[in-house]
Amino acid sequence: MKKFNIYNLADKVPFYIFMIICSVTIFYYNRVFGVIAFAITGFLAFYEVRSLSEKKEELEEYMENFNEKFDEVTRRAIFSMPFPLVILNDGGKIIWHNSNFKNLIDEEEPTLNLEISEVFPEVNMESLPEDNQFIPIEYKGDFYRMFINTFVDSKAEKNVLLYIVEYTNEKNLENLLLDESISVINLNVDNYDELSENTDDTNRPMVFAKIDSIINNFASEHEGFAIKYEQEDYTIVMSYENLLKAIKSKFYILDEVREIEEGNRIPATLSIGVGTLEKNPLEAHKSARACLNIALGRGGDQAVVKMEDHFEYFGGKNQSVSKNSTVKARVMANGLIKLLERSGDVFIMGHKNPDMDSLGSCLGVMELAKKLNKNFYIVLKEITPAIEKIYNSLMKNYPNTEDFNIKDIFIKPSDAVDLCKNDSVVVVLDHHRKTSSEAPKLLEISKNIILIDHHRRSSDYIDNAILTYLEPHASSTSELITEILFYSSDRMKIPKVIAEALLAGITVDTKNFILQTGVRTFEAASILKRQGADSIKVRQLFRNDISTVRQKGEVVYKAEIYRDRIAIGTLEEVSDDNILIAAQAADELLNMNNIEAAFVATKLKNKIHISGRSLGDISVQLILEKLDGGGHLTSAGTQMDIPMKEAVEELKKVIDEYLQEDKDESNTDR
């Protein structure tokens, strides 16, 4: 191989400096020899420059010849590549391909100038991966990786080179390993105690034997096995392939258990948590337990499956089972008192844009903290129209003393962050999502977080609470707090205005004791009545001014009836009362004949707020969860960062999906 020793003339500078010094020295002693020395030095310098120039010309000629050879090698290599190659222009049209690509697509028609997306729909020119990244594609039952390389041609036009590598064998092996991976399913008879109490002694064994049989048959049908390790708890292990079959059937086991009729006066219900796609069986079991907790937190009678980076929900379209037992409330009251006693300051926090249930429950916890002689605060950013009347009543009628003034306990979120310490207690009420909190920063500062809520559990719940009381069967958080208050002490006495605030919280969430109302709801209301709550004054808290009534009426008047049984209204005008008006308008729409659910969209600063209400046959929670919202079967809400028109269209789209799923399940049942 020819070698080129390339260097600059500057590399020889020290040598010529030395030669010049020597020539000067010789010239000083002998001028004749000095001139000869200068001549030799000049000749050497001339020869060096000429030699360097010749070497550079020789190198340039070599590189030109090499480039030509390289281009020829490149062309030969490309044409002889063993896999399909395609070149696209900037618009995504095929401008060249090799014979392997032609053989792959097996098309008789010319493919030049054809859009690549017409051949491979997975390729989107607007969102191509970076160079050397690939797009996974499936074509005629085989699997390929399409690698990307962009370049600019001689005309300065951008082109894309795609080379396609098959990996069908690897994909099939991957699918095989995936199908045979372990999936763990945890099942819980979530109303076991109520079912036992409402079944005669002679029939009780038959009911639970039937449940055992259904669960074991379900496991056998899916080539798995079931283990019963508690009276109401089971574990099923099956392959991922069979789990997909269970998912496709929408976990029909939920319906089979609910339809048991062996002398039980209430239906049996299951909650199911599924852990899958984990690195080992232990992690799958932990994942299944977490999913089961979510299912129970959402009211039971449903399945929750963790699929890689998201959750999937099945069932949950029925009202939560009302639990008459107050044992848990008594235990929670005891646990709450102990935590408050041993910790620092107490920060009581409802959700953003608070309603009467949020404020009422905060005031109830305030009374408990006051009884325990704790230093406490209620975190409240602003007085919204929904709580303005109860707040004003509180300021006017609360029995202040020399040592205590009700005004001093309300603080802004920024002040709460400054005051909160690691040993402080943060009591989160009427919500369980960090983003919904008045001061989310408090959840990072304090290590003592207590969560009390009645909404169905979402996947993004606050997961670092040391005490959680999440009861979706309850009418309201005010109901739960009322029970805790009066199970904490036999002699508990609260001011009349606090009792009215708690009763208002129950009233607003039950729509005047119509929806989500159980025996314990009326028991809580009777407790508050004995504490002096005036029903007439509570009713007056819900009165509106003429402007609100007109706006609400306009929403109802202009509402669209969608799919014959769903009302959708919009409130374009922006005001501080928008959320309150939207909620009340949705309630009003339910009074119309044949309307089973109602949604009202309204503008809220830079967002669109949607309030959803139903009579129970349609789950507004499952609908609005698809729009990153949440709530209850009969009452839910969400917010969206898009224009009103787009928000309504998105709402209609998820309503259609919900109704189609409901229809598919009905057909399956038949």
Image (cartoon, rainbow, N blue to C red):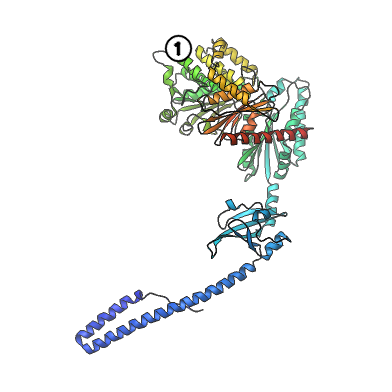
Q: Is residue 407 visible?
A: yes
Residue 288 position in % (x across, y down) = 64, 37
Instruction: Name the image quarter holding residue 467.
Output: top right
Tell me the quadrant of the picture where the C terminus can be found. top right
Which amino acid is tagged 1? Pro
Q: Is residue 10 placed above or below 534 in the rendered structure?
A: below
Disc 1, SS: loop
Q: Is residue 58 placed above or below 605 in the rendered structure?
A: below
The residue indicated by pointer 1 is: 399
Q: Is residue 103 placed above or below 541 in the rendered structure?
A: below
Instruction: Name the image quarter holding residue 625.
Output: top right
Left or right position of 225 against 22: right
Residue 610 position in % (x across, y down) = 58, 30
Which residue lies most toward the left here?
Answer: 29
Q: Residue at x 20, y 84 (%)?
A: 28
Which residue lies most toward the bottom here?
Answer: 32
Residue 282 position in % (x across, y down) = 63, 41
Q: Nearer the viewer, residue 71 or 363?
A: 71
Q: Is residue 157 placed above or below 266 in the rendered structure?
A: below
Left or right position of 33 against 144: left
Q: Nearer the viewer, residue 537 or 385?
A: 385
